[in-house]
Amino acid sequence: MNKLDLLKKHFGYTSFRSGQEVIIDNILANRDALGIMPTGGGKSLCYQIPALMMGGVTIVVSPLIALMKDQVDGLNESGVSSTFLNSTLSVAETRQRIDEIIEGLHTLVYVAPERLLTDSFYTLCKHVNVKFVAIDEAHCISQWGHDFRPSYRDIPRFIERLDERPIIAAFTATATAYVIDEIKALLGLNSPYEHIASFDRPNLFYKILKPTDRLRYIKGYLTTNFIEGSGIIYCATRKTVESLSVKLKAQGFSVAGYHGGMDSESRTRIQDAFMMDEIAIIVATNAFGMGIDKPDVRFVIHYNMPKNMEAYYQEAGRAGRDGNKSDCLLMYAPSDIVKQKLMIAQNSSSLERDRIQYENLQKLVNYCHTNDCLRNEIRQYFGENIAVNNCGSCGNCLEAGEFTDMTLEAQKILSCVYRTGQRFGVNMIIQVLRGSKNKKILDWKLNEVSTYGIITDISEGGLRELTMNLIARGYLTMTTDTYPTLKLHPSSRAVLKGQEEVLIRKERIEIKDKKKKQKQAKRKTTLEVDPVLLDQLTRYRKEIAEEKGVPLYVIFHNAALEEMTYYMPTTKEAFLEIKGVGEKKFDNYGVGFMKLIDQFILDNKIETSSLMTRLSDRYSEVLLDETLSRVEVVPQTSGKDRYELTYQVYKAGGRLEEIAEKRGFTVPTIVKHFKKLEDQGEVIEWQRFITREKIDQISLVIDAVGTSSLKTIKEKLSDDISYTDIHLVLAMEIK
Ligand SMILES: [Zn+2]
């Protein structure tokens, strides 16, 4: 059977999603592969289809022990014989499964990484033909990633011990360019085919909130916006989980708390109840969710800011896996930063690791303060190039236009940082500006600087917001050590000289605003779903799921049920047209569902001819979908690659102009690359390209005439100073 037949037969789809097919083709052509695909992007098909076609056994390494059973149940339901080995099995069960694998009964074997180097697993692998090893959640191998799992480092040794090297494919949903490099190197991937899908999740609505009363906001949100499906509320600490879940329960919401301090039995019980739709909302720490694959999570609210962008992306990404509109709301308060910093300090391992964590935290803080498109900020963080400035569907883009001019205040803050010698952190600067008589201020004689007490009409919170915004925009930088200090970035000159305006988004913390309502109105599904029939089908699905002891979506996804109520299929041919229904699922459940539908049509005297029209429209839609999915999606060269190449050329030596020529860019672009590389932690020796004397001369002129016209600067300088020199100085930090 070819891959499309297998796709239809086992998984019920008629075409592959973006990226899947090319990964599968490469694996089948015996090439290693690396797939970075967002949650819900269909990673698992990328190894399940090749496993079916390669023969022998495919080993799937997965850290998600709690989820393995569901994954394997789902596969067996689809007619793909599979099994798993992990610590939840008894010795006898393990023994039996090993026998089955040796007998060749299973195509896929899911295994926890801790088991790879055990003697029993080694012996097992000697008896079967391991053709293919798929590594799920591959970012766990990197200690700079957010889910480091030491036993992932055993994978290469396990592979070495096999008689023949299998094809290796690694998959993950979250990895920065740095982590991607680590995955490739540590797993020893052999010039892999790389597919890096966009990190964009168009159905997710991102929004940053700074409510004064978080609880009130959540109550309002749940009352007005939350109608069906499930939701997750993430909190930073166990204590918050407990108090928030109690408060929400008292308001009558269907809520349970979940955190790592609870015994594993209660945790499993709550997780199961959530999966079975018996509990609608989970309030949890980040202990909840690794591997939670519930398709209809309609919102993920962060009650506190998480630890970094990757964690945020992953946690928020648990919303909307079914592709329907879902909300990702991040509540932010300055105290969250303190909380996160404390956690870093408490779990301190090495200075280097702490530094990276502080830096990663700062990037998320910047995200909370940006004026720009939130969707783009996330994509750029993961190294994507952005073509459109405004996505039109995130909190920031929807609220564009509501800005207030804070240029003057920004100038005051920047010059206060400068006048106090770029030695102090945010709190101190705010106190100086507000004219505090704090002892420290007086000790340092900061009451004598010219910016002391020059802002009296803005609250402390407002000033903090503004300062953080200046950091987020890059006018100010904040060091990432124990006592972070603020420094001016060269780009702040433009603000100080009044050449750039600083516009700040007005705070929007109202629950009932018009935009929300408009958005909700647009959120109607395109299909007219019959609620009565849907209710019958949903209840029937629940019965089967309970009987079989599997999650609901293993039977059919909600989307499939919705389609059934619209198309009302009563023949096998029609039923197989429903999204996610394959031969195997039809054989197992089709008749039962069709009986209900048939009865419904009879009871309600529905005209079958109108149903026929719906179905034939559906055929043409599918055809169109298939055509679209065949259009080749060219992965964008990631920013990381560009900068990396520039860095290689830089390290090889040569003048700036030569580097520019080799890279095919202009000098100013190369200088920008250098800045970017510095931001990424590389060391650029600027002095290699320009002398100290020249720097001083140029700095003096810039101070006198500003930065708006390069020509003016050039004219004021001696002839031996080139435009390249000026670009360099503009790019360097003010020292
Ligand atoms: Zn946007």
Image (tube, rainbow, N blue to C red):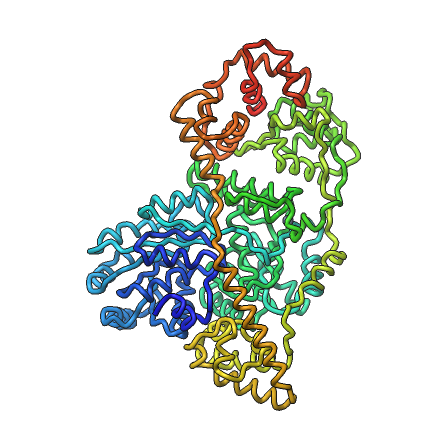
Residue 210, can we see it?
yes
The residue positioned 72% from the left and 58% from the top of the image is: 516
Instruction: Give the percent coordinates (x, y) of residue 148.
Output: 41, 49
The residue positioned 20% from the left and 64% from the top of the image is: 127
Q: Is residue 142 above or below residue 201?
A: above
Instruction: Give the percent coordinates (x, y) of residue 504.
Output: 72, 40
The residue positioned 56% from the left and 66% from the top of the image is: 296
In the foreground, 161 or 331: 161
- Tell me the quadrant of the picture where the N terminus can be found: bottom left
Q: Is residue 65 above or below residue 682?
A: below
In the foreground, 105 or 623: 623
Instruction: Give the percent coordinates (x, y) of residue 519.
Output: 70, 59
- Tell me the quadrant of the picture where the C terminus can be found: top right
Q: How many marks?
A: 0
For residue 202, side relative to residue 430 (left or right): left
Q: Is residue 25 above or below residue 105?
A: above
Residue sitting farthest toward the right: 457
For residue 119, side relative to residue 516 (left or right): left
The residue positioned 35% from the left and 55% from the top of the image is: 26
For residue 727, side relative to residue 587 (left or right): right
Instruction: Give the percent coordinates (x, y) of residue 365.
Output: 59, 42
Residue 488, can we see it?
no
